[in-house]
């Protein structure tokens, strides 16, 4: 899902695209997950956050970050 300025429609020169990628499971620590996924083919700078589905559900239930992202998100692929 895309979130941030591109999802809200208020991006400008120099904006990057913020993406959340959800995976079923992974053994990689959070800090290493984005490096394992290549975003180099995208035409602009990308901030990529990779969560497992279980982590995301926990963040939705317990935090403020994930619910805020879901409110403004544009789903790129279901």
Image (cartoon, helix red, strand yellow):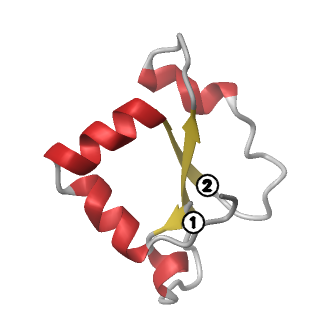
Q: Quadrant of residue 31?
A: top left
* Coordinates of residue 13 in the picture (x, y in percent): 59, 82
* Coordinates of residue 73 in the picture (x, y in percent): 47, 70
Viewer-nearest residue: 9 or 26: 26
| Residue 31 falls left or right of residue 33 | left
Q: In the rendering, which numbered label is found on residue 16?
A: 1
Q: Residues within 10 Å of mark 2 (few under 14, many from 20)?
A: some
Label 2: element kind: strand
Residue 7 sits above or below residue 76 on the image: below
| Cβ atoms under marks 2 and 1 closer than 8 Å | yes
| Picture quarter with the C terminus | bottom right
Comes first in the chain, label 2 or label 1: 1
Q: CA distance from mark 2 to mark 1?
A: 5 Å
Which residue does the image show at 67% across and 25% down from the upper left? 36
Q: Quadrant of residue 70?
A: bottom left
Viewer-nearest residue: 58 or 12: 58
Which residue does the image show at 52% across and 78% down from the upper left? 7
Q: In the rendering, which numbered label is found on residue 65?
A: none
Which residue does the image show at 46% across and 84% down from the upper left? 8
* Coordinates of residue 41 in the picture (x, y in percent): 84, 51
Q: What residue did someone put label 2 on?
A: 46
Which residue does the image show at 33% across and 42% down from the upper left? 57
Q: Residues within 10 Å of mark 1 (few under 14, many from 20)?
A: some
Residue 35 sits above or below residue 61 on the image: above
Residue 52 sits above or below residue 2 on the image: above
Residue 50 sits above or below residue 65 on the image: above
| Picture quarter with the N terminus | bottom right
């Amino acid at each position: 899902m895309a979130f941030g300025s591109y999802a809200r429609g208020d991006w400008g020169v120099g904006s990057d695209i913020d993406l959340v990628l959800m995976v079923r499971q992974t053994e990689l620590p959070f800090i290493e997950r984005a490096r394992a996924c290549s975003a180099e083919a995208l035409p602009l700078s990308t901030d990529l956050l990779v969560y497992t589905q279980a982590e995301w559900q926990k963040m939705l239930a317990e935090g403020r970050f994930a619910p805020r992202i879901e409110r403004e998100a544009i789903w790129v692929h279901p």
